[in-house]
Image (cartoon, rainbow, N blue to C red):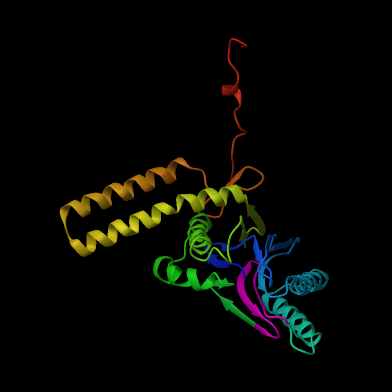
Amino acid sequence: MTIGIGMVCKGGLVIAADTRSVCVDGSTAHMRKLRIKTSTNSAIVATFAASDVRSTETLLGDIFRDLDSTAFCSLEECEGVVRSQMVKWSASHPHGAPETEFILGVAVAGAHCLYHCQPPNAMTRKGYIAIGQGGAIVDPFRAILFVDRHGPKTTLLEIAYLMRRAKTDYGSACGGLTNAVFLRANPLAAFEVRSDSMARAEGWSVNCDIAMRAVSGALISGSKESQDCVMKVVGDGIRHSQILRFMLTDSREEIEDDGSIRPLPPPDFSSLYDDDGD
């Protein structure tokens, strides 16, 4: 029970997941569901949704270890390793493997790909994936609102909107913080977004709902008053987004829409002190 989202963007891909875990007895816990591995020639990111968390973590650990030891040089080689491990893992459960699926993002040799993986051997290339129970909530929103492909910063904001909807509309299964990673294909790198930055973006995304309600009302009614309301609501939302800094990494860097990573100046604490020394 969870929500995990993967989206291909310009120059790479983004993968995100919540931290809520719901056990079979109905109790809840919070855990990190993202796994990241980078090397000189490749970068891999994965998140999962499963009925047996420990078993799925074992599967992903074996996959990452095999990919690291083989030093794969192409997407095709990566696919062979992943499928082989999924078949082996499924065979180790003679009475039926636990229900599991995971999103895998891979960048190697200037190429990148987003996979939807389901043991024993399903590994499908996708441009968008949502796994877990929250997928039933976010799939319709994404199909209507976020069809076009954008840069990583805009894609992260789109995912923040979808994550908020999943946590709000399916709060029994989705919740907690959001961990997100931008996997860049060239130059090869993986940048994790700070969870407080994603939380701020999720809070800001309420403006999208307000704007969509205003636009729908104006289209249906056709009144001049409704049109004026739309201009104000959209304008306020844009001004608010320009004030906030979104998508900061742990190294105080900001992910831009062209895929570049812009260092921010160090924080200024001078305003905390009075010139008089009081």
Image coordinates of residue 54 in percent, x first then y, are 77, 71
Seen in the image, is 220 located left or right of residue 262?
A: left
Q: Is residue 262 magenta?
A: no
Q: What residue is shown at x 18% (from left), y 51% (from top)?
A: 225
Camera-nearest residue between 42 and 101? 101
Q: Is residue 100 magenta?
A: yes
Residue 105's place in the image compared with 249, above or below, is below
Image coordinates of residue 20 in percent, x first then y, are 64, 62
Residue lying at the far top of the rendered structure: 276
Residue lying at the far right of the rendered structure: 69
Q: Quadrant of the N terminus?
A: bottom right
Q: Quadrant of the C terminus?
A: top right
Image coordinates of residue 62 in percent, x first then y, are 80, 73
Report the predominant secondary structure element of the magenta stretch: strand
Residue lying at the far bottom of the rendered structure: 94
Q: What residue is shown at x 61% (from left), y 71% (from top)?
A: 113
**Can residue 236 be seen in the rendering of this structure?**
yes
Camera-nearest residue between 70 and 223? 223
Camera-nearest residue between 251 and 60? 60
Q: What residue is shown at x 75% (from left), y 71% (from top)?
A: 60
The image quarter containing residue 175 is bottom right
Image coordinates of residue 4 in percent, x first then y, are 59, 67
Camera-nearest residue between 229 and 8? 229
Residue 178's place in the image compared with 87, above or below, is above
Region rendered in magenta: 98-122
